[in-house]
Amino acid sequence: MFNPMMLVTALILFIFAPSPALRPTAQDAAQTPTTAPTHKAVKPTAESQAKAKKLYEVDCAMCHGDNGNGKTDLASGMGLKLGDWSNPSTLAGVTDETLFATIRNGKDKMPSEAEGRAKDDDVWNIIIYIRKMSQPTTAAPGK
Ligand code: HEC
C-alpha cells in the first residue's frame, strides 16, 4: 500500500507549494528571496579572493587587523573589543548569513560596507577570506 514515490511526490508538491497550479515550473525554482542572499552560489576564485583581500585591507584591516586578530591601534584607541578571528572558535558558531548582515549593515561602531563598494559576491568572498584566517594550513596572510 505504501508507495515511496508518493512520499517523493508529496515532498515535491510541498517544496513548490506556493505555485497555485501545484505544478513546479522553472520559474518557481528560479525564485530567490532578494533580502536573504545566499553564498552557496559563490565559488571563490584566485581573482575574487584577491579582490576580497584588497577590500579587507582597505576597509576592514584598520580595525580588525591584517590577520584578523582585532589587536589594532585604532580598535584600542576607539575602545573596541574585537573578536580574534585567528582563533577558530571565535566565529565557529556564527553563520555566514549573520556575518553578511553585520558587514552589509554595520553594527554599533562598525561602519556598513555599502553595495557600491562591495557587491554581494564581494561580501561573500570577504567572509570566505575572513574564515580562512583561522586555518593554519593556508599561508598566513602576514602579520
Ligand atoms: C571602525 C572599526 C571597524 C571597521 C573599519 C570594520 N569593523 Fe567589523 N567590527 C567592528 C566592531 C566594533 C565590531 C563588533 C560589533 C558588535 O558586535 O558590537 C565588528 C564586528 C564585525 C564582525 C562580526 C563578527 C565579530 O567578530 O564580532 C564582522 C564579520 C566584521 N566586523 C567584519 C568587518 C569587515 C568585513 C569589515 C570591512 C568591510 C569591517 N568589519 C570593518 C569594527 C570595525
Image (tube, rainbow, N blue to C red):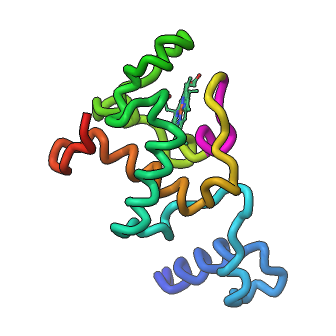
- Which of 97/42 is in front? 42
- Tell which residue pokes out farthest to the right in this image: 20
Q: Is residue 104 magenta?
A: yes
- Which of 34/102 is in front? 102
Please tell me which residue is depicted at 64% across the width and 53% down the height of the picture: 117
**Where in the image, quadrant-wise, is ligand 1 located?**
top right
The quadrant in which residue 26 appears is bottom right
Residue 67 in the figure: left or right of residue 8? left
Q: Position of residue 141 (x, y in %)?
A: 27, 44
- Which of 36/79 is in front? 79
User: Is 45 drawn above or below residue 128 in the view shown?
Assistant: below
Q: Is residue 112 magenta?
A: no
Residue 107 in the figure: left or right of residue 88? right
Q: Which residues are magenta?
A: 101-108
Residue 50 in the figure: left or right of residue 17? left
Please tell me which residue is depicted at 53% across the width and 10% down the height of the picture: 79
Residue 24 in the figure: left or right of residue 103? right
